[in-house]
Image (tube, rainbow, N blue to C red):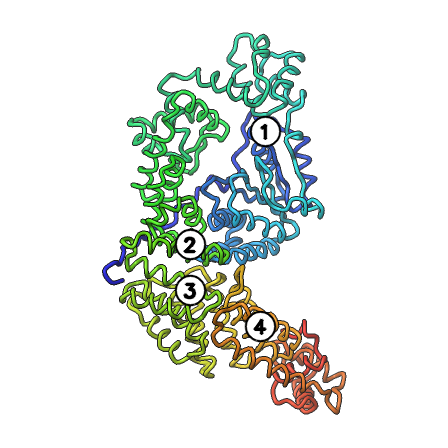
Amino acid sequence: MAGDDRQLHVLEPPPLVETKLLPPRPRQDALRRARLLDQLDNFAPAALTLVDAPVGFGKTMLVQSWCAAQTDVDIAWVSIESADDDPARLWTYLATSVDRIRSGLGRNTLRRLQGSGIQLESAIDELMNALAGYGRPVAIVLDDLHLVQADASLSSIEYAIERLPAGTRLIATTRADPPIRLGRLRGRGALQEIRSSDLAFTVEEARSLLVELEGIDLDETALNQLVDRTEGWPAGLYLAALWLRGLHDPQSRVQEFAGDHRHVADYLTGEVLDTLDPDERQFLLRTSVFGRFTAPLCDAVLGRDDSQTVLAEIQRRNLFLVSLDARGEWFRYHHLFADLLQLELDHTEPDRTATLRGQAAAWFREQGLPVDAAREAAAAGDEETVAELLMEYHVWMVRSGREGTLLRWVDWLSERSLLERPELLGVAAIAAGLIRQSAIRRRRYIALADRARVEHPERWTPYVEAMYSLARAIWIDGDVGEAIRNARRGVEVAGGGESELPALACLAHALLLSGDTLAARAHAERAIRHPHLDHRSQGVLLALATLALVEAEDGAVEAATSLTDDAFERARAAGVEDSWMGGIAHVARAATLAAMGQLASAEREAERGEWLRRAPEPTVENTHARLLLAEIRIARGRLSLASADLDQSRHEMEGFIDPGCLPDIANRIEAALRKAARDTTPPVEAPTQAELAVLRLLPTELSQRKIGAELYLSMNTVKTHTRELYRKLGVRSRPEAVARATALGLLDPEESPG
């Protein structure tokens, strides 16, 4: 880009935390709660089992114990953290865990998840298909589901629940009901629940824990008192055991134990922390604010050089430290213990938390960990640092499939910050479209960018103008002419820089939709010869698919096939084959196959392309894909479906400001429908039963030899029946025969694709 090209950060996605993919081993002294384990066994037929209760009710411990006892069920475990509240990251973990069951089981899903603008439903479908063919029962465990709050992440989980194959179940631990349609699942018998009332300890279980396992001398009265005062809260009882076992006369001290959860937490904070020496106590309190931490982080933020030694001692003493990786470098505290530590820190040093988080954000930033840095900066209320991180890494976040994370932080920023950084508004609009957010959301970012142009003209650089123009050109909501103008502006301001390639591709595609195929060809060819070809795979994909559509329309099927194959190769390499952007490759392949006369395959590709090109609101791109599908269906004789496609397309076009060439295509389809309807006069001579048997196999891809084998006929007999069918139907080819027979009702329209 002239005068304003930026050096892009090329970062590899952070490695997966392996320990999050394995059920933590149950503690040696953990109580085996047979009644709850039996419930989990009995709930197997339900798609979803929720273990749903407030903090400290032993949800994870229960499911760990159940997993450890399984011999006939394979387990896929994911321990969720707040940083996983991004659908691509969440499903990468989930598919990786499934792949641990058997190598390759999640491989195709992971491939689909590698790239920007992924079509998440396609990745989930791939995983469900793999599980359906696996052949053994599988339990997928999502531990701490309450940390998933983004609408896109929750929708993806609900989508998967609806499609779980027989033999596969989902078990989720959560502190609160997830905002999905639980009532619907209950009504269908697809949901089973274990709640706090189920998880609360009985007196018998308290005796097993405190007296038999922990060896604490408590009589029946003391046990009843303790259960009553804790209301059976498992964490309260476990922490009570931690306190009581160090006392000389535990039975006499039970009465001091506070009753409700808040009091239990306050009391145990003091009792546990007061047993620590001041330095260890301070270390625990101050490191509790980090989402995750490592010894170098602790050293840098706390100004010490012995954090590795301190962490090793904390781990040895079982002070609720959880290792996050196999090498023992990254840690977090048990969620309950972290809550207690933070309460105490806020009480003793009320102004310390923000400072610590700010220092952690700076350290993460220096280490090239922008997502962690943004999380800590946001928790510290440091809007400036979050904005700076997005400015520095926004291109990387889109290219690495973190559009959801990018949008979450953009939406967290104030309007003031966004207006001062209009490049974030342009990339946010692009990211929102790539993950198929509503046009309203994209238009909000564009509207803010329009304000920024007026209020902060000094910040409106050529880079911003290129981003802005690309954001307005890449999705054609209803005005082809405006898309062309914005794409031309994007090409102009790019000045030969990297952003010129996607701008050229957008311009070529918009010109194609306007009906100017000559200009579309010229700009698409210019895009695929661009010097920055390797850096813009999605722009190249759009240009290749556009050029393939032009060649297919001209009947140059060999060129169209080569271009389409190249487009799919790039889509697969970028991980966007089944994304909104990948949909254009399917549309181009459909047009190419139709030009070759392979109508059954063309219809399948057109259906896929139309579905991938959908958005929450009508767009010119989706309507164009549906019109192509209608043309192919007419050629196949599926007139009622084609008519419905045409009606829907015309209805959508009424809302477009400039639909480009779509009305001309619609008129052509309408004329073809009328002609096809006139051609539905039954043949003078009806096909015989033997000929009809051959006819029913013509929509398939079976050769004449294989049709003969299927019907126990010689190939010569099949040829004879086929010639007679052509004569009686008045056609000259197999596709024409299928189309005419479908229109006449001799073939079932729902079965004719083969």
Callout 4 amino acid = Arg
Q: Earlier in the sequence, mark 3 or mark 1?
A: 1
Label placed on residue 445: 2
Return the disc, 4 or 3, that comes first in the chain's sequence: 3
**What residue is pinned by disc 3?**
474
Which image quadrant is residue 72 in?
A: top right
**How many other residues sit within 10 Å of disc 3, few (<14), some (14-19) or many (≥20)?**
many
Earlier along the polypeptide chain: callout 4 or callout 2? 2
The numbered dot on residue 592 is none
Q: Amino acid at mark 2?
A: Tyr
x, y percentage for residue 143? 54, 39
SS label for mark 4 = helix
Distance between the Cα atoms at labels 3 and 1?
A: 50 Å
Q: Label 4, label 3: how many angstroms apart (C-alpha)?
A: 22 Å
User: For the residue marked with disc 3, what is the amino acid?
Assistant: Ile
Whole-Å distance between the Cαs marked 4 and 2?
Answer: 29 Å
Q: Which residue is mark 1?
A: 57
Mark 2: secondary structure: helix
Q: Find residue 565 and report its horizontal and vertical position in percent.
A: 44, 72
Q: Is residue 412 visible?
A: yes
Residue at the far left: name it: 3
Front-most of residues 383 and 92: 383
Cα separation, mark 4 vs mark 1, equals 57 Å
User: Vertical placement of 596 versus 95: above or below?
Assistant: below
Numbered disc 1: secondary structure: loop
Q: Residue furthest front?
A: 454
